[in-house]
Amino acid sequence: MSGNWSSFTHECRAGGWRALLVAAVGYGFGVNVLPYYTLGAFVGPLEQTFGWSRAEVQGCLLSVVAGTLVAASTWGWLTDRHGVRKVGIVSQIGLAATLLALAFNPGHLWYWYGGWFLMTVLGLGTSPVTWTRSVVKWFNEGRGFALAVALCGTGLSSLVMPTAAAYAIEAIGWRLAYVILAASVVLIALPVTIWVLRPEDEHGPSTPTAAAEDMHGLTLAEALKGVRFWMLTLSLMMVGFAVSGLIPNIVPMMTGRGLEATTAATLMGVLGLSIIVGRLATGAAVDRFWAPFVALALLPMPAISCIILESGVSDYMAIAACVVLIGIATGAEFDLAPYLVTRYFGTRSYSQIYAIQWIGFTVAAGSAPVLYGYLFDLTGNYSLPLYVSAGLFLLSPVVLLGLGRYPMFGSAKPLTDGALSRAAT
């Protein structure tokens, strides 16, 4: 059976481990993870310091949307043309510089929004669009699990950084906390990119299947003409909206129910662990089964969490259980997205195709927290946002069922277990 453990370990030993390590660290300290997952810890202090509303603070995520619209296609093209290593190094430097700039906000909302916009434009080369390119080049039969391992950087970062940020804010203030975040990029992520990923590692091993995916895979223009591209983008946007609306509001939601800020922040650690579990389970499953079936099994689960949270539950263990289901769905979707890009479009223009889908995801992910914050300011509760998320969690995997069987590129066999792949017409 393709996608077994021995295939994954063989591809690791052949040199793929370097791509995995760099991708995990780079993404975990990237622009879509580090500032985003710690934002909840900064909401209260910024409200107190500048008198901004919750919706105004989280309005910075609209700047992320704008920055992604401006820069994502360029970063995708640069990655396909110049490789992961060069793009990653340049973008990590830009991310660290803009994180540092946030610490010097004089109290102007335009400075806050402009800082997040510039951080996105300069730091978007630290997104999965960049890091996963070398992973899909190196891994073939174990690609799903390899992507899961690489993207576990999200879970590890959310396990540590939100709590660390909350304690840093309490101890030394929010300004110095942003200095620490910038330093973590320079002292941890950047050296790994420089010293671990070699220039010759960019293209992975030479295999018949890899050659077929590169030669016969779709160009960006060809992908945009197909309905599969838009179905996958729609599904990704649905889950992105549902998840991203919830995550920055978990800590404020729970502190509003009486939990201490540091206690509520530990829920982000629970989220991080569950993301890792969901991601690894999904990666192992899609190497063996038709990926939309895997999505159908995993993505509806957090709808239950939304209904429970809407009931007003304040027990920590019950809330943690809800967060676990949300994390599993988050891990599943973010592993499915790059995997499905390679299976349905090949790796010929992988980063460019994934970059356009990443724009769609970011539009949804960036607008959801602002809308959720606005609805909270308007109604004083999160009932409507939670119902919206529940519905999207249920609809997203249904859309994926329409993708059909994996196409074949050139003479290469589809890298999937035969039974479910043939049944998925």
Image (cartoon, helix red, strand yellow):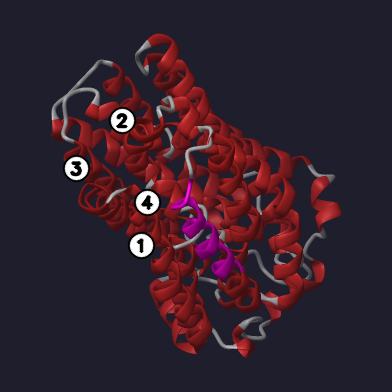
Q: Could you tell me which residue is drawn at 48 percent across and 19 percent down?
A: 374
Q: Do the residues labelled 3 and 2 touch (CB within 8 Å)?
A: no
Q: Could you tell me residue 351's position as x and y percent?
A: 69, 62
For residue 180, the mark is: 1
Q: Distance between the residues labelled 1 and 2?
A: 22 Å
Q: In this figure, which residue is indicated by the disc labeled 3? A: 262
Question: At label 3, which amino acid type do we have?
Answer: Thr
* The one of 41 and 135 positioned closer to us in this rendering: 41
Q: Nearer the viewer, mark 1 or mark 3?
A: 1
The segment highlighted magenta reads 91-105
Q: In this figure, which residue is indicated by the disc labeled 4? A: 175
Q: In this figure, which residue is indicated by the disc labeled 2? A: 252
Callout 3: SS? helix
Label 2 environment density (alpha carbons within 10 Å; few <14, some 14–19, many ≥20): some
Question: At label 4, which amino acid type do we have?
Answer: Arg
Q: Could you tell me which residue is drawn at 53 percent across and 51 percent down?
A: 336
Does label 1 or label 4 sit earlier along the sequence? 4
